[in-house]
Image: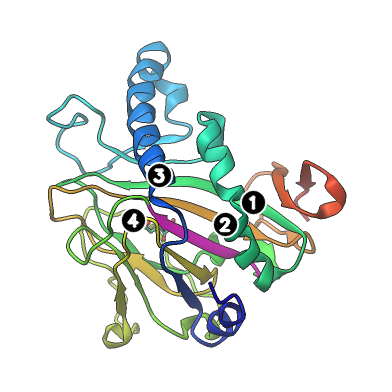
Amino acid sequence: MNSDAFPAALEDRGFYIAEDLIDQATIAAAVAEVGRLHELYIELEAQDPESVEAHFMIEPFAQSHRQTDGMPVLRKIEQVQIYSDFFERLPRTPALVDLVSAFIGPDILLFRNTLMLKPGNHGSAHRLHQDSPYWHMEPATQITVSIALTDATIDNGCFQVIPGSHKSGLQDWGAIFRASNTLTDRDDIDLSSLIQVPLRAGSAIFFDSKLVHGSAANTTPNPRNTALYAYFPPNVRYCPPEGYGSHQKTCPVIRGCGGQSELVFTPE
Ligand SMILES: O=C(O)CCC(=O)C(=O)O
């Protein structure tokens, strides 16, 4: 992998595609682990239906909460490391972290550890947005990585991005999940510059957290499942808006940071 091309591509276009970043044995293990997490959801829901919703999201627009095989129609799992050692380790994969390090330097924290799931015939669109306006980190130097755990195609809802859009400032995007499967209802967005990013399972897209991106609905029977990570350097301030809550954020250290295991960010 040519890591020299990586920072330049991120700076110029706002994204970079790393083909075959994760080997197929690891992808097969990830697919099995995603299956186990679906079964775990059923157990946790039976024990405590309210607390399971803290991190597991059922596809908001599914007519039924169960697939034909009885598994839940899960749309995403946030903070998946709480439920899975496998997904605690995956964002620490050296080849992945080396690329991130080429862009943000030797000290790296993890802001998000999420499984984004688009079940076959169910997964709704993820409307166009930038990540940074939702994250309240200054400066907005985060980098997001989405690793395809299944083939991501145009028909099952692969990523779509507007190259270079990370240079045009932060904007307000409103709610991301909506009943309509359109990518945006803003008429000031030039959709002609939107490009599709199909990925083979094991490949990944890295992108600047200011890049405009989204994904269409899954219109196929095949799931489009991804592991999504957001990395950032420690020199940020956490500045949530008034009324957002005063919770501090504790983020695991992925590399560097003087060997500490996590850092705590207090709202400013
Ligand atoms: O995985 C997707 O379809 C989009 C995810 C995304 O854009 C996000 O979580 O910010």
Q: Is residue 56 left or right of residue 160?
A: right
Q: Is mark 2 within 8 Å of ligand 1?
A: no
How far, Cα to Cα, is label 4 from label 3? 11 Å
> Which amino acid does the dot numbered 3 rest on?
Ala
Determine whether the residue tagged by mark 3 lies in a helix, strand or loop.
Answer: helix
Would you call the spot at circle 3 few (<14 residues within 10 Å), some (14-19), or many (20 or more)?
few
Q: Is residue 254 left or right of residue 14?
A: right
> Which amino acid does the dot numbered 1 rest on?
Leu
Q: In the image, is residue 142 part of the stretch drawn in magenta?
A: yes
Kindly give the residue lying farthest to the top in the view shown.
47
Q: Is residue 79 visible?
A: no
Mark 2 or mark 4: whose residue is earlier in sequence: 4
Q: Mark 4 sits on what residue?
A: 201
Q: Mark 3 sits on what residue?
A: 25
Magenta span covers which residues? 141-148
Between 184 and 214, the residue placed more toward the observer is 214
How far, Cα to Cα, is label 2 from label 1? 6 Å
Q: Position of residue 215 (x, y in %)?
A: 30, 64
> Residue at 46% of width from left, 55% of height from top?
22
Tell me, for residue 110, which label it has, or none: 1
**Quarter of the rendering containing residue 42:** top left
How far, Cα to Cα, is label 2 from label 4? 19 Å
How far, Cα to Cα, is label 2 from label 3? 24 Å
Mark 2 or 3, which is nearer the eye? 3
